[in-house]
Every structure is written in structure tokens, then in C-alpha cells.
Image (spheres, rainbow, N blue to C red):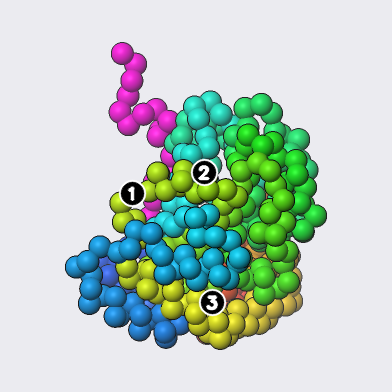
Amino acid sequence: MDRTIPLERFDDMPVMAPQILQEPDNQPGTKFVRLNLNENPLPPSPNAIAAMHDAVNIANRYPDHSCSALAQIISARIGISTDRLAFGNGSGEMLFAAAAIAVDRNDQAVLPGPTFAPVGKNVRLAGGEVVTVPVLDNGSNNVSGMLDAINEHTALFYLCTPNSPTGGMLEAEQIKLAADRVPSDCLLMVDEAYHEFAAWEGGPDVLSLLAAREGPWAVIRTFSKAYGLSGARIGYAIVGNRALAAGFSKMRIGFNVNRIALAGACAAMRDQNYLEMVLDTISRERQRLSVTLQNYGLQVYPSAANFLLARANKSSDTIAAKLEEHHILVQTLPWPDDNGSLRITIGTTTENDAFLNALTDAL
Ligand SMILES: *Cc1c(COP(=O)(O)O)cnc(C)c1O
């Protein structure tokens, strides 16, 4: 008997929830400026807030498991039938389900590195092995390098555009290459958590590029970022065929999408003006921050998302620790060298100014 519980593959899994963000009174608090989680600094659309208030009154009733109202709105928007949509408790759940659906024991998944950390964890939870292909110098996925890493064990091919945490966006050409060349017994997954921001900057239309693909594919999107509903937890997958949608459906825990999130997501999608205001605001602030950081002597990477990747000639961990003394939270990552980089979420003007002030001290 050599079984251990939890299973051995849990040994090096990271534990969730950094202590610093605990909320003993269920309030985010005012002590810290949170530029570390790529949240939207602006509240959800007022219509979404009103819809969620209304939904609270019927919280005694289970939600619509088919998410039919939201499915119809999305279907009409993207021109793909509702039976090719799947919903989850944040897009994180879709990423988890995708690994479970596609990856068998000892299968491999090809991922960019660095990328959204839970994806690799999901693969390992499914008993699979992660093959990491470093991102390009500009922070975008190295698609041809990733294609070269495919072998007969490859079950999942994960692209993230714009890539978190590095920010780089894929060109249409690269997405088309993956759509054509990823084998038809391998799930091609494209994480578009920052889709709305990327589209605002004129990014490629991933869905239409995948439409011609013969093998299975899934595009993952969320209401957590541009729609400002991180706390409500709702995301979705758009998939290439009905069988794959059924796979996601089989993975679902009952009533995984709550009615408050559903109501909020529907109202948010209907409020296009508010979304455009958010995208315009974040885009301008990102531009301002980028220019200022470069004036401070930092190297700033191109970004079409609600965050920037920047680096100084100094350890990013040291800078982040100093920022934290000023109650500013940012994320660090060990890329592209020993100094690492800072991933800075675009906040409000006030928050960004507080960050810039603290940074002059940290540098
Ligand atoms: C934020 C993010 C997600 C998931 O967010 P949810 O809140 O679970 O919807 C997924 N992928 C990437 C790349 C992200 O940055």
C-alpha cells in the first residue's frame, strides 16, 4: 500500500488566498491599493448592480442551471448557438473543467511560461504533465515553439492572449497557425480573459479564426475583468462542437452559477455604453502609466489588457516589498531574468498616482 491521502500529486500544489487580502468583516478594506489581481477598479455597471439587487430577493430559489437568458445574449452577440456555450463559477472553473475533460493520466499539456498559474495546476490535478514553452521576448505566447513541443501524448494546447502575467497579445496569424496545426485529438484552448480590452485595442477576432478548425477547441471568457464582476464569479466557454459542450456540462457541479451573478452578467452585457466607458478609462490610464513608468527609467512591455508588465534594474521582489510598506500591492514574477518583473493592474487615477508616488521611493 503506497497510496497517500491527499494524493502525492497534491504535494507541490500552491495553496490559495494570500493572507494579506483576508476580509474579517467581509469588506475589502481601505488599507491596501489592490493592483495585484487584475480586478477592475471601477464598480460594475449601475444596471448590473440593480439587477443583482433584484436577484437577491429571490435567493431562496435555485438559479436557471442552463443560464438561458445569458446564453441567448452571448449567442446573439457572437453568432454561435447556445448549445456550444458552457458556464461556470468564474472562468477559472472552465479552465479546471477543460483539463479534466481533455487530460488523462500521463498525458501532456503544452503551456506558455509564464502564464496563468492555475492552468498548470489543473493539468497536474488531472494526472497530466505540463510542458512549458517560454514566451517570446515581447511577452506573447511562442506559438511555433509550442507547436514543436507537441507529441503523441499532447492532449491540451493552451494559449492565453493577452497573456497573463506578461501582457503580450497574439497576432491573427499565430492563432490561425495553432488552429491549423494543433492535432485534431488535442484540445486547443484559448484563454481570452482580457477579450474585451484586446478587442478595444483592435486585437484579432479569435472566434472567427478558430471557426475553420477541425479538432476540438474552446475559448474561455469571464465577467471578472472588463465587466467588473470578479466578486460575483461567472465565466464561460465557447466551444467548437456540441460534444465538447456536453463534456463541460457533465463536469459541472449542480447550480454552479448563482442567480445573482447571472442577473449581473446579463445586465452588464446589455449595458454596452458602460463597458465602453470602462474600456476607454482603463486604456487611457494604462497609456499614462506606461509613459510615466518609462520616464522613471523602467522597461514597459506592450499590453492590450488592464495591466502592465514593467521592470527596473533592480529586484522586483525588493521593489514590491517597498511598495507594500506604502500599502500598494502589485504582483511580481520571475521573468525574464533574476530581477523578475512587476505586474501592475491599472487602477483608478488616484490609485495609480499613489502607486507612482510609492514607486519613486521604492526605486
Ligand atoms: C483573471 C483570469 C482568469 C479567470 O478569472 P475568473 O475570475 O475565474 O473568471 C482566467 N484566465 C486569465 C488569464 C486571467 O487573467
Find out if the beta carbon at label 1 lies less than 8 Å from the nearest ligand 1 atom. no
Q: How many labels sit on residues?
A: 3
Q: Residue 332's image quarter?
A: bottom right
Q: Residue furthest right?
A: 173
Mark 2, residue position: 243
Say which label, 2 or 1, has the lower sequence index: 2
- Is there CB contact under 8 Å for labels 1 and 3? no
Mark 1, residue position: 253
Q: Residue furthest left?
A: 60
Callout in the foreground (1, 3): 1
**Circle 2: residue type:** Ala
Callout in the foreground (2, 3): 2
Residue nearer the viewer, 239 or 144: 239
Q: Which residues are magenta?
A: 1-18
- Helix, strand or loop under label 2: helix
**Circle 3: residue type:** Gly
> Is residue 251 left or right of 254 when viewed as pictured?
right
Please give the label number shown on residue 347.
3
